[in-house]
Image (cartoon, rainbow, N blue to C red):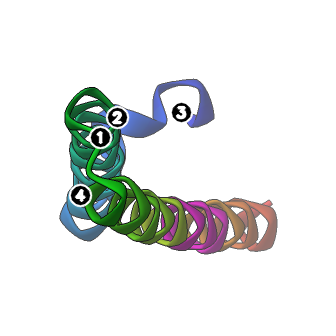
Amino acid sequence: MLNEFWATASASYKAVVFGAMGLIAAGIVLNVIGQMTGNDAVTFSSLAVIGGGLVLHAAGVVIRGHSVQKLIRKHSTKG
């Protein structure tokens, strides 16, 4: 059961994970565009977008940790 977490993960966890990946990818694209055009404003603003993705990633880790703890508690009280 714990080995296939993605199959049983909540919709909120999946949304946070995909949001984090999207923000990080968008930040990387913005960074490349900023570097190629020499636009420092775009380059530095891309760091904020990447940072937002990392914050969402950390939130996903917290959500997953709480879900696993609930599952472990549920199974340990049954036995």
Would you call the spot at circle 2 few (<14 residues within 10 Å), some (14-19), or many (20 or more)? Answer: some
Q: Report the Cα–Cα distance between label 3 and label 1.
A: 49 Å
Disc 1 marks which residue? 38
- Count neighbours of disc 3 (C-alpha within 10 A) and say few if under 14, some if 14 to 19, many if 20 or more: few
Q: Main secondary structure of the magenta part?
A: helix
Q: Residue furthest front?
A: 38
Q: Which residues are magenta?
A: 57-66
Sequence order check, earlier mark of 4 and 2: 4
Q: Which mark is residue 19?
A: 4
Instruction: Single out the mark in the foreground, 4 or 3.
Output: 4
Q: Position of residue 73 (x, y in %)?
A: 74, 72
Q: Is residue 77 left or right of residue 68?
A: right
Q: Earlier in the sequence, mark 2 or mark 3?
A: 3
Q: Specify the amino acid type for callout 1.
A: Gly
Query: Which is in the foreground here, disc 2 or disc 3?
Result: 2
Q: Are marks 4 and 1 in contact (CB under 8 Å)?
A: no
Amino acid found under the numbered disc labelled 4: Gly
| Residue annotated with mark 3 | 1
41 shown above or below 40? below
Name the residue tied to disc 2: 35
- Mark 1 and mark 2 in contact? Answer it, CB < 8 Å: yes
- At 23% from the left and 58% from the top, the residue drawn is 19
Q: Quadrant of the C terminus?
A: bottom right
SS for dot 2: helix
Real-space Cα separation, disc 1 to disc 2, in angstroms? 5 Å
Q: Is residue 2 left or right of residue 21?
A: right
Mark earlier in primary sequence (4, 3): 3
Total of numbered circles in the picture? 4
Say which amino acid is labelled 3: Met
Q: Position of residue 13 (x, y in %)?
A: 34, 62
Q: Is residue 20 magenta?
A: no
